Image: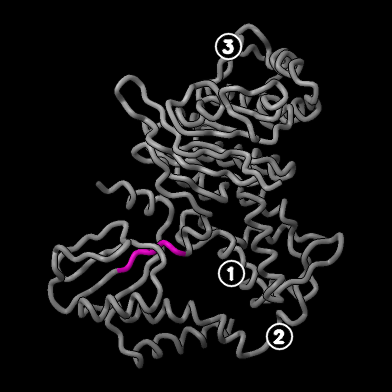
């Protein structure tokens, strides 16, 4: 059966009078690594918590591994790994005791993997949890979420507290591991370069909805910026169908849009009596174009 | 044997508008064209490249598969991908076509700088000469 490990339709959630999620649609294909991108405060954590049954949605539907997250049975829970933004553990436990304690809840806990990875990530097995830095705590959190080899891994801003190069190395290790086990990953972040390195899909959450949900390669191949250079000043209200954003300054216009082909370029050139150039956009450019207002 | 020492040649920029798998394909083609990857030589494994470059292994697999379907590399059972024999001395028309994207970029840059076609070729000629001497 080709079922999406995560399937969300019209999901809504409000805090008091503030609508945070206003109809989120999202499908996460099996085996994919999806980066959920959004500015701080856009509701990424809220969405993830709704998927894990930690928050109750106000409307819409969510299915996680085929189940309603609000009503997850123990077997399904054991197939999911989750790392919250702030990992909370018993401070007086050592790292090794924590691994043993959490592992005892899972029949399929991989002790060898947990211990080996703790060493590889330079986590001291004898250290007390309360002495760990935020970065080390997040590493331990992810290790705890990986130890039972879940089918679906949900990471909320993974390793956001590590410095960029440590984060890169660390995310690569996680992805190396999940790729081998063909796990599905949904991770939230506001760091576009993390998504560019490790995700194969990107979903952008903005104003309570998913504004963009695509394969990263497809997005980069199809989303372009057209630079129009007119012989004379271009009209300030110049508009192009389907454009994400249009900026006009003097005789120059920058138009970002998807699926700009040669025919469209020729058409723009003749409509505006201008020369058109096509430029690539990286994920940060695209993200900024979506947030220009 | 895998030539892991070659991996640093695959210099990628994840934050570019060009998809990573396409950058990787380009990097391998360049290695083959320059002879740094010789006919019959094995590409580093997907996992090695992914680890080294700190990227998703699926991206590397995708690049390797596309290179395979283009005939640049061929799959060797149980060993990985090796540089195909046709890749190094393929169809000249095909090789000319592979140069087109870079040529378009050069043309666009020349246009921006207001250089005429003659002036552009005058710059390119000596550069090609330099390359031949190396």
Front residue of this view, candidates A192 and A182: A182
- Residue A155 falls in image quadrant: top right
In the rendered structure, find residue A209 and report the number of the disc placed on it.
none
| Residue A168, image quadrant | top right
Instruction: Report the span colored magenta.
Output: A222-226
Q: Is residue A173 above or below residue A161?
A: below
Element marked by disc 1: helix
Label disc, if present, on residue B26 of the rendered structure: 1
Q: Residue at x 67, y 88 (%)?
A: B91
What residue is drawn where x is 76% and y is 15%?
A: A104
Same-chain check, marks 1 and 2: yes
Residue that label 2 marks: B89
Vertical order, B127 against A248 (above or below): below
- Residue A191 at what x, y percent from top left? 45, 41
Say few, some or many: other residues with alpha carbon within 10 Å of mark 2 (under 14 / 14 to 19 / 20 or more): few
**Going by the image, does A277 lie left or right of A97?**
left
**Between disc 1 and disc 2, whose residue precedes?**
1
Describe residue A113's horizontal placement relative to residue A264 as left or right. right
Residue A162: tell me if it is visible: no
């Amino acid at each position: 059966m080709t079922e999406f490990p995560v399937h969300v339709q019209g999901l809504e959630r409000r805090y008091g009078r503030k609508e945070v999620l206003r109809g989120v649609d999202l499908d996460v294909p099996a085996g994919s690594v999806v980066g959920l991108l959004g500015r701080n405060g856009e509701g990424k954590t809220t969405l993830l918590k709704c998927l894990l049954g930690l928050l109750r949605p106000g409307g819409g539907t969510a299915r996680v591994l085929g189940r309603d997250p609000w009503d997850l049975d123990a077997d399904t829970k054991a197939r999911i790994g989750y790392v919250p933004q702030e990992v909370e553990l018993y401070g007086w436990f050592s790292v090794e005791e924590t691994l043993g304690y959490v592992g005892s809840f899972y029949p399929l806990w991989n002790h060898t993997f947990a211990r080996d990875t703790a060493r590889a990530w330079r986590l001291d097995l004898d250290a007390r949890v309360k002495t760990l830095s935020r970065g080390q705590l997040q590493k331990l959190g992810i290790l705890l979420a990986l130890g039972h080899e879940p089918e679906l891994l949900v990471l909320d801003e993974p390793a956001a507290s590590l410095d960029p190069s440590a984060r890169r190395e660390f995310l690569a290790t996680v992805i190396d591991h999940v790729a081998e086990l063909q796990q599905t990953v949904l991770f939230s972040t506001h760091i576009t370069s993390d998504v560019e390195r490790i995700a194969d899909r990107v979903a952008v959450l903005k104003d309570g909805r998913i504004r963009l949900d695509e394969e990263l390669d497809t997005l980069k191949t199809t989303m372009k910026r057209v630079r129009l250079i007119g012989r004379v000043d271009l009209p300030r209200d110049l508009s192009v169908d389907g454009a994400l954003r249009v900026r006009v300054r003097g005789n120059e216009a920058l138009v970002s849009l998807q699926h700009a082909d040669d025919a469209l370029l020729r058409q723009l050139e003749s409509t505006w009596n201008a020369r058109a150039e096509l430029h690539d956009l990286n994920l940060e450019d695209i993200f900024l174009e979506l947030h220009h207002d | 044997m895998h030539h892991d020492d070659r991996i640093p040649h695959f210099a990628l920029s994840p934050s570019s508008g060009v998809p990573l798998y396409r950058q990787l394909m380009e990097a391998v083609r360049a290695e083959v064209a320059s002879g740094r990857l010789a006919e019959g030589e094995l590409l580093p494994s997907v996992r090695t490249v992914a680890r080294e470059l700190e990227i998703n292994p699926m991206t590397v697999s995708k690049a390797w598969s596309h290179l395979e379907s283009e005939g640049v590399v061929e799959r060797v059972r149980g060993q990985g991908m090796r540089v195909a024999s046709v890749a190094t001395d393929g169809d000249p028309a095909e090789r000319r076509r592979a140069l087109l994207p870079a040529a378009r970029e050069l043309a666009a840059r020349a246009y921006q700088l207001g250089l005429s076609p003659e002036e552009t070729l005058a710059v390119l000629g000596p550069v090609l000469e330099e390359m031949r001497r190396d």
